[in-house]
Image: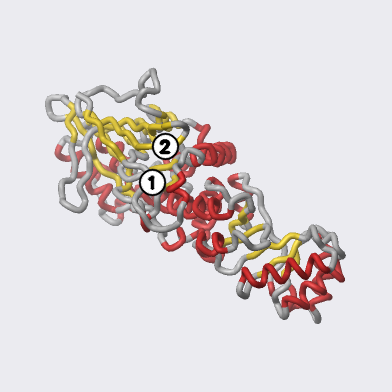
């Protein structure tokens, strides 16, 4: 089994590369940009996620013997292209928003600079990673806002493809979830894992009491017992009889949760289990979590909704050529001009303007003819949003692995504090701040 990621792409990336090698445009310096024209689902902000994963995948974007053989045997590209791909590795530069950063329509989330041949082949890989992970992170951040200080656990592995489940757990953690049920996500990304027992555990035993006793014997009184396999009130009574008033928690996975949670809290307190926590699950999304804000709930477990972007499984990002050199070596901005899918040409530098600690606009400087738009020495334009992720082929490893994931999580927590109050509402609306383009001569 090869570890190459080179074929995680669409065929037309390589047919364009082959054609550019044939007509001499392959080496033309180019700038591609990954951005979203709009925020999916009327959300008021988006969350960048997937950057650390993408960098690792770009490192493995190499064409080995198996990949080249497949391309040759299926007549995907010609012999000259195969020779080019034999030695391919990305040698350009990628700048972009830090993982965990907020984005808005038009935000230049990734800027990929290199030859046309160097950069065009990364389109599908970059979009597949960032569209999925950012959709999950955006939904997760909204859920985290709704939950307030109450912890959220990601439990959606059974509702996603195997590797997508791992990526979703990571994205949710970056955006504010505290743990995951997915062990591979724990191993690969250093995310705390959680989990005790399902309804099948109770059904396996001859009685609910027998199941609870066995679980407590195995995991201790600090465990969480699932009390709704049969009758919830009886389940709670049995749980406290078995584990005592120091039982760590009970989990409720069905019923009218605001009503049931209140009844369970009252029952636990009456039994003397005042410190026993209540965790609720059962098809939660950000709206259900918000509806439970006044209920005596201590923690939430979220599955299907978070791993599917709460109804919007893609962030609708695109990857477009925005600048290139002409035959004379001068930089020109280029852009798609169709009415409903127009893009904004030119290289860009992005800043978030902050007024009294609150974000007020996404300020994007645009220029055609320049060597590079660098962040200004002063903060007159606002907080600089782009960092260098790959410099002439050298990947900044600080964004990868468990350390990069933890850093992205911390960054998201910081920048979310900049959001204006209107951004925290769950209803559909315009973006929380406007995107302002400033042409630079």
Q: Which mark is residue 420?
A: none
The residue at 87%/65% (across/down) is: 244
Please give the name of the residue rendered at 43% of the width and 48% of the height, measured from the top-left corner: 422
Q: Is residue 308 above or below residue 25?
A: below
Q: Are marks 2 and 1 in contact (CB under 8 Å)?
A: yes
Residue 260 as seen in the image, left or right of residue 189? right
User: In the orientation shown, which residue stands out farthest toward the left?
Assistant: 328
Residue 390 seen in the current view: no
Could you say which is closer to the camera, residue 439 or residue 368? Answer: 439
Residue 402 pos. (x, y %): 59, 40
Q: Residue at (32%, 47%) from the top-left corner?
A: 36
Report crowding for label 1: few under 14, some 14 to 19, many 20 or more residues within 10 A (C-alpha): many
- Residue 135 placement (x, y as % from top left): 43, 53
The quadrant in which residue 391 appears is top left
Q: CA distance from mark 2 to mark 1?
A: 9 Å
**Badge 2 is on which residue?**
359
Q: Secondary structure at mark 2?
A: strand
Tell me the crowding category of disc 2: few under 14, some 14 to 19, or many 20 or more residues within 10 angstroms, Cα based: many
The residue nearer to you, when weighing 371 against 295, is: 295
Q: Which mark is residue 432?
A: 1
Query: Is 111 on the left-hand or right-hand side of 284?
Result: left
Instruction: Please name the colour scheme applied to the rendered image.
Output: secondary structure
N-terminal label among 2 and 1: 2
Expressed as whole percent of the image width and height from the top left, the position of residue 217 reads 86, 64
Q: Is residue 193 above or below residue 278?
A: above
What is the quadrant of residue 438 in the picture? top left
As displayed, is residue 282 above or below residue 101?
below
Q: Identify which residue is drawn at 59% across, 46% down.
A: 188
Q: Nearer the viewer, residue 170 or 309?
A: 309
Mark 1: secondary structure:
loop
Q: Quadrant of the C terminus?
A: top left
């Amino acid at each position: 089994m090869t570890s190459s990621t080179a074929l995680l792409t669409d065929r037309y990336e390589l047919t364009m590369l082959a054609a550019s090698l044939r007509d001499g445009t392959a080496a033309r310096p180019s700038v591609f940009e990954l951005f979203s024209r709009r925020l999916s689902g009327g959300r008021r902000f988006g969350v960048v996620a997937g950057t650390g994963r993408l960098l690792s995948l770009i490192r493995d974007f190499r064409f080995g013997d198996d990949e080249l053989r497949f391309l040759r045997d299926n007549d995907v590209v010609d012999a000259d292209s195969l020779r080019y791909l034999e030695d391919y590795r990305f040698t350009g530069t990628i700048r972009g928003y830090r993982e965990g950063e907020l984005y808005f329509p038009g935000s230049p989330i990734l800027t990929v600079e290199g030859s046309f041949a160097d950069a065009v082949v990364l389109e599908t890989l970059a979009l597949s990673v960032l569209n999925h992970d950012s959709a999950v992170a955006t939904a997760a951040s909204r859920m985290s806002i709704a939950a307030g200080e109450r912890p959220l656990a990601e439990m959606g592995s059974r509702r996603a493809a195997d590797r997508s489940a791992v990526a979703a757990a990571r994205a949710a953690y970056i955006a504010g979830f505290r743990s995951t049920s997915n062990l591979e996500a724990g191993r690969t990304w250093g995310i705390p894992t959680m989990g005790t027992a399902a309804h099948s555990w109770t059904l396996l035993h001859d009685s609910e009491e027998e199941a609870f006793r066995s679980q407590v014997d195995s995991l201790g009184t600090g465990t969480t017992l699932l009390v709704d396999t049969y009758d919830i009130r009886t389940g709670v009574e049995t749980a406290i009889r078995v584990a005592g008033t120091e039982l760590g928690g009970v989990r409720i996975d069905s019923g009218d949760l605001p009503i049931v949670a209140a009844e369970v809290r009252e029952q636990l307190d009456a039994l003397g289990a005042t410190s026993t926590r209540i965790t609720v699950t059962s098809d939660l999304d950000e709206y259900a979590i918000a509806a439970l804000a006044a209920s005596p709930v201590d923690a939430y477990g979220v599955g299907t909704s978070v791993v599917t972007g709460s109804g919007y499984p893609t962030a609708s990002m695109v990857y477009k050529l925005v600048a290139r050199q002409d035959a004379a070596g001068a930089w020109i901005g280029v852009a798609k001009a169709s009415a409903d899918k127009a893009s904004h040409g030119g290289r860009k530098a992005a800043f978030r303007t902050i007024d009294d600690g609150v974000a007020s606009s996404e300020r994007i400087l645009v220029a055609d003819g320049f060597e590079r738009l660098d962040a200004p020495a002063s903060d007159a334009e606002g907080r600089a949003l782009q960092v260098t992720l790959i410099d002439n082929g050298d990947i900044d490893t600080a964004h990868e692995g468990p350390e990069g994931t933890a850093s992205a999580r911390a960054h998201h927590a910081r920048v979310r504090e900049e959001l204006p109050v209107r951004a925290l509402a769950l209803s559909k609306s315009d973006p929380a701040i406007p995107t302002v383009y400033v042409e630079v001569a």
